[in-house]
Image: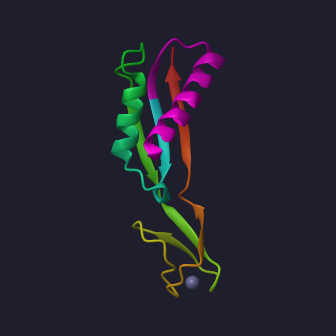
Amino acid sequence: MHDIGLATVLEEQIHKVMEDRRWTRILDVQVKVGQLRNISPTAVQLCIEEIFRSTPSAGARVDVTVLAGVIHCKVCGADSTVEDDLVLCPRCASTNVEAVQGDELILKSLRGE
Ligand SMILES: [Zn+2]
């Protein structure tokens, strides 16, 4: 169940920033999630709200944006943006592709006090 891993990663990153900046709570968090991770922005948002539940950060504004997936085809060399979960080269229909973007999970910005 990768949602638990996701929560752990986000929680660790958020806590590290809070420690570095000596914040006691988060007011605003922006996350970018790669489309190829197959996680819905809503799931990420709920996950972060769950992390903040019963902490001083409860009620923080959570903003999740999706980063489009880009795949590189090892057969024909095309770089293509993928619009759904199907990872297939749109030019030659090969499945011999690698993700060049879209696998990210980035804490884009954090605001706290
Ligand atoms: Zn191709």
Ligand 1 lies in which image quarter?
bottom right
Res. 10 in view: yes
Q: Nearer the viewer, residue 7 or 102?
A: 7
Res. 61 in view: no
Q: Nearer the viewer, residue 3 or 75?
A: 3
Question: Does 13 appear above or below 71?
Answer: above
Which residues make up the magenta segment?
Answer: 1-28
Q: Residue at horizontal 56%, vertical 50%?
A: 104
Q: Residue at horizontal 64%, vertical 81%?
A: 77
Question: Does 33 appear above or below 81?
Answer: above
* Dominant SS in magenta: helix
Left or right: 100 with respect to 88?
Answer: right
Left or right: 38 with respect to 13?
Answer: left
Q: Residue at horizontal 52%, vertical 88%?
A: 92
Q: Position of residue 41 (x, y in %)?
A: 38, 46
The way the protein has been coloured in the rendering is rainbow
Q: How many marks?
A: 0
Q: In the displayed image of the protein, which residue is found farthest to the front? A: 1
Q: Position of residue 100 (x, y in %)?
A: 61, 64
Q: Position of residue 101 (x, y in %)?
A: 58, 60
Question: Does 2 appear above or below 62?
Answer: below
Decide whether residue 3 is among the magenta residues: yes
Q: Residue at horizontal 41%, vertical 22%?
A: 52
Q: Position of residue 54 (x, y in %)?
A: 37, 15
